[in-house]
Image: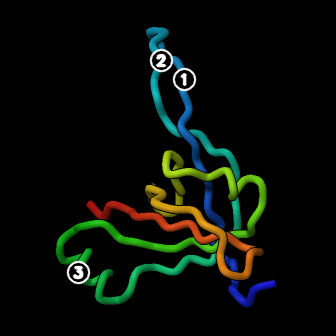
Amino acid sequence: MTGRRRDTLITLERVSITKNEHDEEVEGFAPVGTEWANVIYGKGSERRQAAMEQASQPATFYVDDNALTRSITTADRIELDGQWDIEGNVPSLNRVEREITAVRNAK
């Protein structure tokens, strides 16, 4: 068990192919599940710099280690007050949770 408080509900999304009104294939994202997460945003200096530059904001999402979270790849994304592009997904040192690193474009 971990002492991290998972108090933020995130939605995990995966690339999905659908068809539009002209019967053309369109690539988009569809939810594959939700998870409670402990979200650690980048350092204060990184947040201030990103705000000044209107750049990207990094964050680490700590979630339970389960079949869904193990299946997440860099092609997927997280929905939480906007879209977060996933950069990595590794087991944490305690092996009961995963560390998913992601960035959000602040523009």
Q: In the displayed structure, does residue 69 sit left or right of residue 105?
A: right
**Which quadrant would the N terminus be assigned to in this image?**
bottom right
How far apart are the alpha carbons under marks 3 and 1?
A: 38 Å
Sequence-wise, the earlier of marks 1 and 2 is 1
How busy is the neighbourhood of tag 2: few (under 14 within 10 Å), some, or many (20 plus)? few
x, y percentage for residue 101? Answer: 50, 67
Considering every residue shown, the one lying at the far top of the view is: 22
Element type at mark 2: strand
x, y percentage for residue 81? Answer: 48, 63
Nearest the viewer among 66 and 29 is 66
Check disc 3 and give the amino acid type: Gln
Residue 25 is tagged as 2
x, y percentage for residue 23? Answer: 49, 9
Sequence-wise, the earlier of marks 3 and 2 is 2
How busy is the neighbourhood of tag 3: few (under 14 within 10 Å), some, or many (20 plus)? some
Q: In the displayed structure, does residue 99 sit left or right of residue 46?
A: right
**Are discs 3 and 1 less than 8 Å apart at CB?**
no
**Are discs 1 and 2 less than 8 Å apart at CB?**
yes
How far apart are the alpha carbons under marks 1 and 2?
A: 6 Å
Check disc 2 and give the amino acid type: Glu
**Residue bearing mark 1:** 18
Nearest the viewer among 80 and 101 is 101
Considering every residue shown, the one lying at the far left of the view is: 53
x, y percentage for residue 69? Answer: 69, 58
**Residue bearing mark 3:** 49
Examine the image and state in which quarter residue 58 appears. Answer: bottom left
> What residue is shown at x 22% (from left), y 68% (from top)?
54
Check disc 1 and give the amino acid type: Thr
> What residue is shown at x 26% (from left), y 60% (from top)?
107
Element type at mark 1: strand
